[in-house]
Image: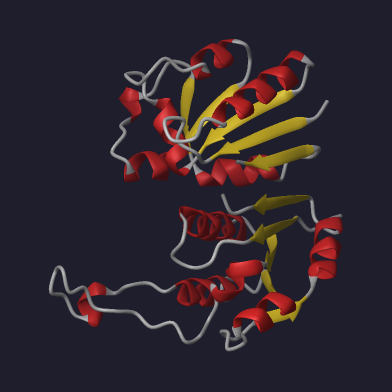
């Protein structure tokens, strides 16, 4: 295995847990190091790249959408996919269908747990980030 | 010999099962493995020297490497000088390097 590969399984839905932010940090750091990263998004994590997400204003602070610059998880996923083309993101198809979550950002693929197994077998290491 | 990385994300004051990670890490170290506990997210609350007595410093003396994520510490207002003895300031980049080491098993908790 000449190329370095890391596979990560995600399960938390957007805005539920710090796990999502941490996962984005790990993926970004790995991509910066030239490591190929495979993400298998399972259960609620298939909603992380949902294109329908919209940033919002902050009524508490009275800031507008533009002033707030609220980051959506789909914007994070898009940005990571653009980092050198080293990221493969696969959403679990059954989880997508259950949630009606098929409208995802460009570059996200559809697959099954069999893809996760294949990705893990081809990687130097696999990190499973479960829900609590 | 295997490298084990326990990624502890839970606050010991909130989750009683953080003890499980400490006990498993200690047992693996006693069997001659390289063991690291990487404190991440609310897991860094265990790193403060002024907190309730933690087993982490004693584990560090026993050869378990204890690292604390700088971003998680910063988010929670914990300064480097507040870390208990034996706990080292670290980063997500270091975690990625550790994950890519040969023969390494990572356990997220």
Q: Residue furthest left?
A: A62
Drawn side of residue B81 relative to residue A8, left or right: left
A115 or B100: nearer the viewer: A115
Residue B97 occupies which quadrant of the picture?
top right
Drawn side of residue A31 relative to residue B73, left or right: right
Residue B69 visible in image? no
Drawn side of residue B93 relative to residue B52, left or right: right
Instruction: Give residue B99's position: percent from left, percent from top.
Output: 68, 44
Instruction: Give residue A55's position: percent from left, percent from top.
Output: 34, 79
Residue at point 42%, 26% (across, down)? B47
The answer to whether residue A121 is above or below residue A91 is above
Instruction: Give residue B25's position: percent from left, percent from top.
Output: 67, 24
Residue at point 41%, 43% (across, down)? B72
Q: For the image shown, how many numbered marks are present on the structure? A: 0
Instruction: Give residue A85's position: percent from left, percent from top.
Output: 65, 74
A4 or A26: nearer the viewer: A26
Residue at point 57%, 59% (across, down)? A32
Residue B71 occupies which quadrant of the picture?
top left
The answer to whether residue A102 is above or below residue A72 is below
Residue at point 52%, 61% (across, down)? A24
Residue B9 visible in image? yes
Q: Quadrant of the N terminus of chain A?
A: bottom right
Q: How is the image coloured?
A: secondary structure
The answer to whether residue B24 is above or below residue B10 is above
Residue B44 occupies which quadrant of the picture?
top left
């Amino acid at each position: 295995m000449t190329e370095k590969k890391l596979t990560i399984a995600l399960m938390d839905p957007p805005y539920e847990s710090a796990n999502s932010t941490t996962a984005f940090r790990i993926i970004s750091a790995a991509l910066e190091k030239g490591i190929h990263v495979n993400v298998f998004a399972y259960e609620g994590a298939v909603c992380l790249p949902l294109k329908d997400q919209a940033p919002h204003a902050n009524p508490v602070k009275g800031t507008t959408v533009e002033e707030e610059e609220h980051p959506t998880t789909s914007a994070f996923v898009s940005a990571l996919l653009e980092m050198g083309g080293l990221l493969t993101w696969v959403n679990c198809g059954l989880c997508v269908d259950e949630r009606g979550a098929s409208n995802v950002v460009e570059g996200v693929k559809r697959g099954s747990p069999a893809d996760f197994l294949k990705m893990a077998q081809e990687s130097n290491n696999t990190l499973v980030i479960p829900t609590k | 010999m295997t490298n084990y990385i326990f990624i502890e994300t839970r606050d010991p004051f909130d989750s009683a099962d953080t003890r499980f990670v400490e006990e498993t890490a200690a047992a693996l170290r006693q069997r001659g493995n390289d063991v690291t506990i990487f404190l991440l997210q609310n897991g860094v609350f265990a790193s403060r020297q002024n907190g309730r007595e933690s087993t982490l410093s004693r584990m560090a003396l026993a050869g378990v490497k204890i690292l604390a994520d700088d971003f998680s510490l910063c988010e929670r207002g914990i300064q480097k000088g507040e870390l208990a003895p034996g706990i080292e300031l670290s980063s997500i980049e270091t975690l990625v390097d550790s994950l890519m080491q040969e023969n390494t098993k990572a356990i997220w908790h």
